[in-house]
Amino acid sequence: MRRALRTTTALITAGALALSGALASCSSSSADRSGVLRVWAGESTPFNDNFNPFSPDAVFATFGAIYEPLFFYNQLSSDPPTGMIGQSFEINGDGTVITVKIKPDLQWSDGQPLTADDVAFTFGYGPNKSPQMVSATAPDATTVVLTYNAPQFTAESLILGSTTIIPKHVWSSITDYASQTNEKPVGSGPYVLDSFSDAAYTIKANPKFRDGEPAVKEVQYLALDANQSGQDLLTTDKLDWSGQFIANPDSVTAGGRIGTANFQQDPTVIMACSNADLGCKGPQTDPAVRQAINLLLDRDEIAKKAFAGLTAKGNPAFLLLPRDQQWLADPATGESPQSPNIAAAQKVLEDAGYAKGSDGIYAKDGVPLDMTIVSPDGWTDYNDADKLISEQAAAAGIRIEARTVSDAEYYTPASTGDYQLMLWGLTQSLVADPYSNYHEYFASSGTAEVGTAPPSGQNFARYSNPEVDAAVTAAAATQDVAAKQAAYATVQQHIAADLPYIPVVVNASQAFFDTKDFTGWPSVEDPYADPLPYLSTASGVVLAHLKPVQK
Amino acid sequence: MAFYLRRTAFYAVTVWAAVSLNFLLPRLLPGDPAAIMIGKLRRASGGRPLSPEVIASINAVLGPPKGTSLWEQYLIYWGRLLHGDLGISSTRYPARVVDLIAAALPWTVVLVGTATVLSFVLGIVAGAWVGWRRGTWLDHLVPVTTVLQSIPYFWLALVLVAVLAVQLGMFPIVGGYDVFDFPAGPEASWAFLVSAFTHAILPAVTIVISSVGGWLLGMRNMMVATMSEDYVVTAQAKGLRPSRVRSRYAARNAAIPSLAGFGIALGFVVAGSIVTEQVFSYPGVGRLMIQAVSGLDYSLMQGVFLVITLTVLAANFVMDLLYGLIDPRVRTHA
């Protein structure tokens, strides 16, 4: 949804601003907001009155500001996680027992004590109940022991960093957790709910918070339906924090009040239905064709023209560099080529038996290289990138038709494999370990025959390689760095050559925040959390760090 | 009397057909709301499997009732409908569709309704005047307003927001009321009404600007045509005052075709102005419709479409009856 909001308005607004610039600009004075921080986390009207941490439709302040996990895993760094409710943890040698020490003397926002009992209850509750779990017990008030029947090395951040801890005295009487709306949330985070309406809701400082009441006393979340509205509110001093795409960030930051950050993480790729054995049809099932596309791309031009130059460079190892530097086996896979090499691309094709036809398009056995790449209508950056890819491919002798489709014609065919090429977004691993990337997008366990959706995982490229599968399984069973490096080296070698996903750019993730009235925002020098207001946990960490500027 | 009976019967059949179609359409579309919701829940829980109880409870609320024929489902659908139950939204689970529509409808009806009436009255009055004074400089109003109408609506709205709201700060930028002054939502106070009114001005103005041209053009041309009718010439020959000829003889007859269009326009008021609501983050029905369609939320879609269909039919019904009253020829020829 948030993606879809970055609509067609950018260029039009440029025109509108030029027009309005001709008029005398009458600067609106900063309204008296008495220290209230106003946030747009990308949510659209109307807000759901839903603070249920188990609901996918809960409002965003639920995750981080009101409820917390045990530890905070900063996706921008490779440092160990910092304690929230948790103080420290230990995983035994075979990865089946996790022992967590929680901080002493904690309280829920309603004044009840928060003990290891609540934590143990949480791990045995509802969707947290893993089929691999044997038991969750609390031997004393600050110790929790989680026992599993299989190694949990790869699930560490899910268990410790993404499981929202809930109060037993509230939830023990709730059986149907999915249909709860939890309108009066009792949490452990820095904020509690103050007031709610379907256009805005306000959270206020939690006096029972373990580190003391946060310095910013009130935070108001707004619901907006258009990116342009967010930009307008930022420029008119009515909004203090938002995470949204703005093609010309200078227009917002020029006033001096708003600062910006852009920690790119999620790769945008050309996803290919790559596996003929699983039913994929089209020239893209030949690795040589994908390698040729990889070589002919002018990524520099795509980044500048389609993504406003706000993206970072991708790599075929699908690591977030420099965070994941220790896992990079071959420096050659550390960055995708930024300028095209058409001669090399054509050589790959010719070596694979393709020859240029009279129409200038390569063909093999009478079948020309003619494919379709799709992106959702209205995602202007994706649509533009597809057009550029189409032009660049044509220059090298490959026909790629760029087509825009509705959202439904994008997501469903992606999962069922009914496509040839798609411009697609992958989600970067949240911890400094690429395991989840490899397991989610490249392992056979995450794929299915064309026509059916994968039961788990998102290997929509239908990539299947026994050596990659074996290496991913090996990496999951160990905590030994050298063994993991060896396993990842195998994965990287294969996926960089087979290219089921051809890296294009790493997506911009722009944040804008009021540096005049509030201090303590994350920066390149101190990236203690990603400053995007829609992120779980990280947004609560940022809020607790902020301080209003005394005037 | 027979005329009114015939019309009533006709509309009763149409309502039945529309409501039945509304039942059938989502069932013909691919996709299962329960499966979508279960997928969302699974992603929210980090890919861990859901317990069978949860899956069962979601299937019970969102899925097709097990072991019932289409005919039985149809009867259940009517039963629920007559009790005012439109189901549970899957994009805003577990919110009730009725509540979502009830919260959005007043905003849309007041904003788009007022703007539509305003636009119609302005267009008709100005059109009658321009038609009456045809051939003078007033004729320039026609191209001016039609050009305004032909500007893409969202562009016009964005320019007006950028200039009047952002640069000059004359109007609020977004929302149906000031969420900073009223963080707890709408309340029954004078200050709130004022806030809601100021927030409605700019969206309403954009709707009026972009729609008045059509009414004006239609009315002006009908006016010119009517003025060459024998009864107008006769009225003038009788020496009636020009203002009387204009309003009672020419304008009254010239407005009849526009009135029919107005009926239809009023019916579509509840559909909201999707783009207006998007640009201004206005809390209306149009927004719900976009979200329902993009999120494949079938119950919400069904609910919104049902409300729109019924209002369009109701508006047409009322206009039909009024038409019979205004123009006796309709009654006898029908």
Image (spheres, coloured by chain):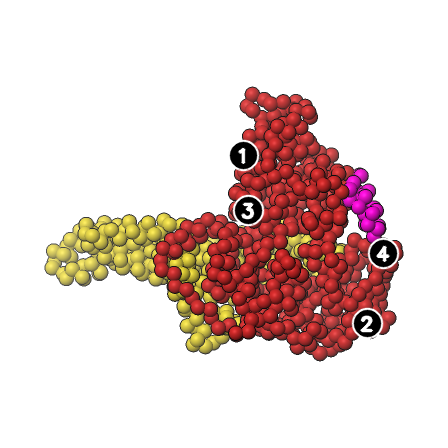
Q: Can residue A281 be seen in this view?
A: no
Give the image location of residue A111, x and y in percent. Answer: 71, 78
Give the image location of residue A15, x and y in percent. Answer: 41, 50
As rendered, which of B204 and A303 lies closer to the eye?
A303
Do the residues under discs 3 and 1 have CB atoms within 8 angstroms? no
* Residue depicted at x 54% and y 64%: A514
Dot 3: chain letter: A
- Chain B tint in image: yellow
Q: In which quarter of the image is the N terminus of chain B?
A: bottom left
The residues bearing labels 2 and 3 have C-alpha atoms spaced at a distance of: 49 Å
Question: On the same chain: label 4 and label 3?
Answer: yes
* Residue depicted at x 64% and y 32%: A292
Instruction: Give, as a three-letter code, the residue at label 1.
Output: Glu
Give the image location of residue A273, x and y in percent. Answer: 67, 38
Instruction: Give, as a three-letter code, the residue at label 3.
Output: Gly
- Classify 10 Å Cα crowding around label 3: few (below 14), some (14-19), many (20 and above): some
Read off the magenta span: A466-490
The residues bearing labels 1 and 4 have C-alpha atoms spaced at a distance of: 50 Å
In the displayed structure, A449 sits above or below A361; it is below
Disc 4 vs disc 3: which is toward the camera?
3
Question: On the same chain: label 3 and label 1?
Answer: yes
Instruction: Give, as a three-letter code, the residue at label 2.
Output: Thr
The residues bearing labels 4 and 3 have C-alpha atoms spaced at a distance of: 43 Å
Question: On the same chain: label 2 and label 3?
Answer: yes
Give the image location of residue A541, x and y in percent. Answer: 66, 65
What residue did someone put label 4 on?
A95
